Image (spheres, rainbow, N blue to C red):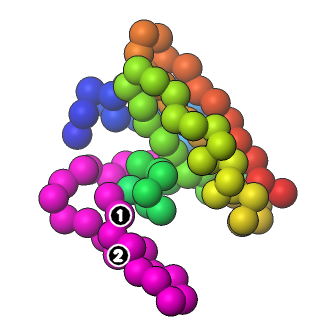
Amino acid sequence: FSKSNHTALDWLLVRGFKDIILRTHCRNHDIWYNKGTNKQCMDYWNLFDGMCFDGVGNLWFIQVKTSSWPSDDMTMNWLVKHKNIRAITIRTQPSIQARFYYSK
């Protein structure tokens, strides 16, 4: 469990998020099944490091980054294919910051 994950976990807890699951990156990959194709992935859909719930029960997908922001395009391209999804990217260095994403 990385220092960045600990920092993100503390940040989420202070803000009322709960039931937080963060993946540990290891040599074992998951299989992402889809009609006609299967892919190996280390993160959920090769994009998210975990999941949690906010104070009213909404499910949030979590990205944790140490020093750089991930591509907004990658996150938004995934979100537009799905409904009622919330995602948060937490960058831990140089200071902790977050970006929030919503699908309709």
Classify residue 92 as left or right of residue 3.
right
Q: Does the magenta stretch include residue 28?
A: yes
Callout 1 secondary element: strand
The residue lying furthest to the front in this view is 36
Classify residue 29 as left or right of residue 76.
left
| Residue drawn at 46 percent across, 24 percent down | 68
Type of amino acid under label 1: Cys
Residue to which mark 1 is pinned: 41
Residue 58 showing in the rendered view:
no
Q: Alpha-carbon distance for marks 2 and 1?
A: 6 Å
Residue to which mark 2 is pinned: 31
Q: From what the image shows, is residue 82 above or below residue 32?
A: above
Q: Give the range drawn in magenta.
A: 20-42
Q: Nearer the viewer, residue 34 or 85?
A: 34
Q: Nearer the viewer, residue 74 or 86?
A: 74
| Residue drawn at 34 percent across, 34 percent down | 5
Q: Earlier in the sequence, mark 2 or mark 1?
A: 2
Q: From what the image shows, is residue 69 above or below residue 96?
A: below
Callout 2 secondary element: strand
The residue lying furthest to the top in this view is 94
Type of amino acid under label 2: Ile
Classify residue 89 as left or right of residue 31.
right
Q: Is residue 37 magenta?
A: yes
Give the percent coordinates (x, y) of residue 88: 59, 40
Mark 2 in CB contact with mark 1 (< 8 angstroms): yes
Give the percent coordinates (x, y) of residue 41: 35, 64
| Residue drawn at 65 percent across, 43 percent down | 73
In the picture, residue 93 is in which quadrant? top left
Q: Residues within 10 Å of mark 1 (few under 14, many from 20)?
A: some
Q: From what the image shows, is residue 67 above or below residue 12?
A: above
